[in-house]
């Protein structure tokens, strides 16, 4: 009888140890997929934020404070849309991010009348399947309608700023 | 039924019927033979004779048990136990303890939200620049952008 006890105990031991070693299911807080550095900045204590801002020249620090205030005061819907777009952008490799920055700066330099036209084209191209988009970008009509710079802006922003499917 | 048959506990009619079956069933015949061998062995076994003073020693021991002082009774439980008895008890106690720890383990405390990581002001400035660029790439009349005001 004692032998049976010992045998049962020894056989149960590995199972008990495995159970003990298994990490218990624990509710985990899912990180916000759209989190950006401003969200992290907003989580810092006011003292920490001021300490970081104090490392910059006062005028620059003041400007950052103003811009942050404007960002934090944005309408939630508007802010969410912007965060979504920024998320797509921030996931690009650094080189592509730089291309997008350049194109966006160029877009900003376009004549005011051309900006909505270019923007509309990008939005329309995003709706098209890959092959149709390529056909459109290579069409005579497209080339005749947009300047080479606009074509480049449209091409790159359509390709790089496409929201994840 | 074979066990009862080997022990000679079946009535004649049932035993006769079983013997009829055994004649034609080698498997049952073999089992019956084995059972019979066991019973024969048990019949042949003789219990070892007890010592002449067995009863006297037994009663003395019982008396001694009754005479144990309260202290001896209390400490008897803590006296070293033979390994043969102690091992299964220790193993079982260990398992029970482990099971208790597993089943009644207090809810693990969710790790405190990690202290907000420090973000450099320059990093925030870069993000604000990018957000502003992205914000301005929007239809002129839309709610989300296309506005000249800096963010």
Image (cartoon, coloured by chain):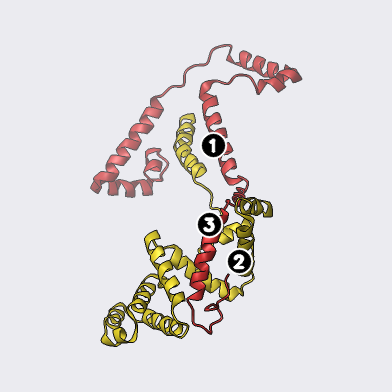
Chain colours: A yellow, B red
The span from disc 2 to disc 1 (Cα, nearest Å) is 62 Å
Q: Give A126 or B66, whichever is nearer the viewer.
A: A126
Q: In which quarter of the image is residue A143?
A: bottom left
Chain identifier of the residue bearing label 2 in the image: A
Query: Residue B86: x, y in percent?
Result: 55, 25
Give the structural element (helix, strand or loop) at label 2: helix
Residue A78 in the image: above or below residue B78: below
Residue B118 in the image: above or below residue A141: above
Chain identifier of the residue bearing label 1 in the image: B
The label on residue A67 is 2
Residue at the disc numbered 3: B123
Chain identifier of the residue bearing label 3 in the image: B
Query: Residue B42: x, y in percent?
Result: 40, 29
Q: Residue at x 32, y 40 (%)?
A: B32
The span from disc 3 to disc 2 (Cα, nearest Å) is 13 Å
Residue A130 visible at all: yes
Is A8 on the left-hand or right-hand side of A148?
right
Residue at the disc numbered 1: B95
Query: Residue A131: x, y in percent?
Result: 27, 79
């Amino acid at each position: 009888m004692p032998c049976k006890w010992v045998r049962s105990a020894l056989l149960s031991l590995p199972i008990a140890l495995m159970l003990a070693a298994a990490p218990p299911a624990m509710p985990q807080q899912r990180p916000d997929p759209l989190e950006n550095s401003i969200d992290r900045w907003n989580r810092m204590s006011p003292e920490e934020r001021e300490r970081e801002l104090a490392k910059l020249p006062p005028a620059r620090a003041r400007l950052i404070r103003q811009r942050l205030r404007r960002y934090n005061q944005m309408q939630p819907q508007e802010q969410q849309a912007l965060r979504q777009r920024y998320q797509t952008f921030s996931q690009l490799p650094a080189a592509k991010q730089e291309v997008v920055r350049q194109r966006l700066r160029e877009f900003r330099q376009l004549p005011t009348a051309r900006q909505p036209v270019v923007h509309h084209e990008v939005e329309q191209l995003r709706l098209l399947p890959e092959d149709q988009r390529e056909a459109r970008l290579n069409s005579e009509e497209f080339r005749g309608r947009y300047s080479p710079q606009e074509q480049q802006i449209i091409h790159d922003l359509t390709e790089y700023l496409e929201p994840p499917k | 039924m074979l066990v009862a048959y080997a022990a000679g506990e079946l009535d004649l009619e049932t035993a006769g019927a079983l013997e009829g079956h055994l004649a034609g069933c080698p498997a049952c015949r073999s089992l019956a033979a084995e059972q019979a061998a066991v019973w024969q062995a048990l019949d042949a076994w003789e219990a070892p004779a007890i010592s002449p003073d067995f009863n006297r020693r037994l009663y003395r021991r019982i008396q001694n048990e009754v005479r144990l002082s309260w202290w001896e009774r209390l400490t008897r439980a803590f006296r070293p136990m033979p390994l043969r008895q102690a091992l299964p008890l220790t193993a079982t106690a260990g398992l029970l303890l482990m099971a208790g720890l597993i089943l009644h383990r207090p809810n693990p405390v969710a790790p405190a939200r990690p202290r907000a990581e420090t973000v450099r002001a320059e990093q925030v400035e870069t993000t604000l620049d990018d957000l502003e660029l992205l914000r301005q790439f929007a239809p002129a009349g839309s709610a989300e952008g296309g506005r000249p005001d800096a963010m």
